[in-house]
Image (tube, helix red, strand yellow):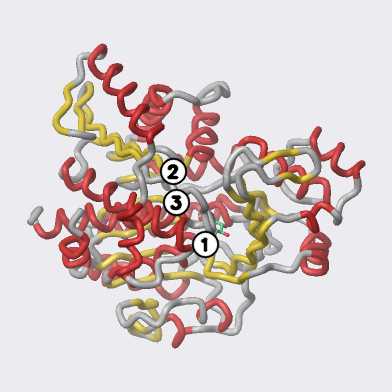
Amino acid sequence: MNLKKNLNLIKDLTVFVAYNTDIDAICYLNEDFEKKFSKNEFKQALKEEPKAIKNKVDLLSGILRSMRDNNAEELPILNPKMVEFLKNNIKPEEKRMGGQAGIMSNLLSTLGCKTIVYTKLLSKKQSNLFRDNENLFFPKVNKTLKLKHPKKCSKKVKTKTNWIFEFKKGSMVFSTKAKGSNRFIAASRPEEINLEVEKLEKHVKELANLCDCAILSGYHDLKKKYKDGSSYLDHLKSAEKFLEKLKKENPNLTVQVEFASVPDREMRSEILKRIVSKADSLSMDRSEISSILKVLEKEKKLTSIIEYYKALEKIFEEFEINCVKIHTLNYFMGIFQDYLNPKHVKKGLLFARDLGASRIKKGEIEDKEDVKIAEGIEVSRKGKKERKKFEEFLKNSKGEKLEKGLYKLKDKYVVLIPTKIVKEPKRTVGAGDIISAGSFALENALEKSGGK
Ligand code: GLC
């Protein structure tokens, strides 16, 4: 991979990123954590399948399930007493930039993209977590639209905090063993987060024409009901209009939606219908793809690569999106049609593989040079095996191998890239965002440059 060349191309790209930022209070699970719960609570937690955190048992249950199934889960905290419980009982080891928009805009601007990030709760504390990159901006509206560093745009508003429980493969809480290194998120739901863009609404045309592409996420942060009587659906409808307007004002703008954990089925279904179906590309992880499928058909467990391929195909057809991508531990896969140049999509994912591995190993990509960390990391053997399985399936289905990792099956392109496996992950939260943002930025930069 030619890092220098990739970074050179990325420099010419302008990306708009919205909506979600928060402070991630990161806790590494250890024996002390267990002491906060009784044996009885543990027994109860094993039986439950919570959709939200209303008490201690729900919290423990979410964490145990995530460990047992190696699933990156997130549940909303719906009881203020539980926020108090967390504040009083768990001491986070780090506080970092959280939320897809926050994590992605820090990464993209570090890589050199001109990055415009919009988020609603830009408190002083929140804005301080944005890096001091000269090419990172907030779209500030004061009659006219001006681009200023987020730190210069902070407001007197609440700060959203999410609690991240990171665990390592093999670690134990009571008798539950972690199947892999992963994380569970207990997420706050401030009343103020509603995806409204306020004054920016009047400047969508200008904004859309400043950018080559956009990454949208944070729809999962909506509340079902708001104190002013509005509902998630009212706000989702305005977000839908905003997206439609972005696309109308700049039809060349490529839009990617980053999915997230949405435990409420009805909300999930509306996000898919109103938002995802209007984007060009959808990016998901393993738990997200299963949750999307649950909206479309009876629940079934996805294990083999062929099942994942079929799931991608189903989502592609159902929501009529040009490109659907998934990032898993051992491979990334994308299927697309009428999207960007297939070779650009493949190069994007190869770049993302190094970004992901470097981030998981170091915990953060703070500098362009950090991407080099991945050079010494081995490609997943399991991922390569899965690729072989897929190639067998391709042969039997009369598909065509165009080059290594790039295929044509039926009328769609398929890209399949084995990941690089980090043996001792430093931190996993946000790694998927790095992968999605990195691949999307490079594929768009390559497209912009005409593939040079
Ligand atoms: C979700 C969580 C946020 C976390 C992010 C990482 O947006 O709400 O806390 O930082 O995912 O992907």
- Amino acid type at mark 1: Gly
Mark 3–mark 2 distance (CA, rounded to whole Å): 8 Å
Number of residues whose C-alpha sits closer than 10 Å to that of mark 2, classed few (under 14), some (14–19) or many (20 or more)? many
The answer to whether residue 94 is left or right of residue 80 is left
Question: What residue is shown with label 3?
Answer: 432
Q: Does the residue labelled 2 lie within 8 Å of ligand 1?
A: no
Q: What label does residue 99 carry, if any?
A: 1
Mark 1–mark 2 distance (CA, rounded to whole Å): 15 Å
Question: Residue at the location (59% across, 52% down)?
Answer: 232
In this picture, is 142 found above or below 287? below
Residue 144 spot, x, y in % from top left: 33, 84
Answer with the quarter of the image where residue 243 lies.
Answer: bottom left
Q: Do the residues labelled 1 and 2 touch (CB within 8 Å)?
A: no
Q: Do the residues labelled 3 and 1 touch (CB within 8 Å)?
A: no
Number of residues whose C-alpha sits closer than 10 Å to that of mark 3, classed few (under 14), some (14–19) or many (20 or more)? many
Within the displayed image, which quadrant is ligand 1 positioned in? bottom right
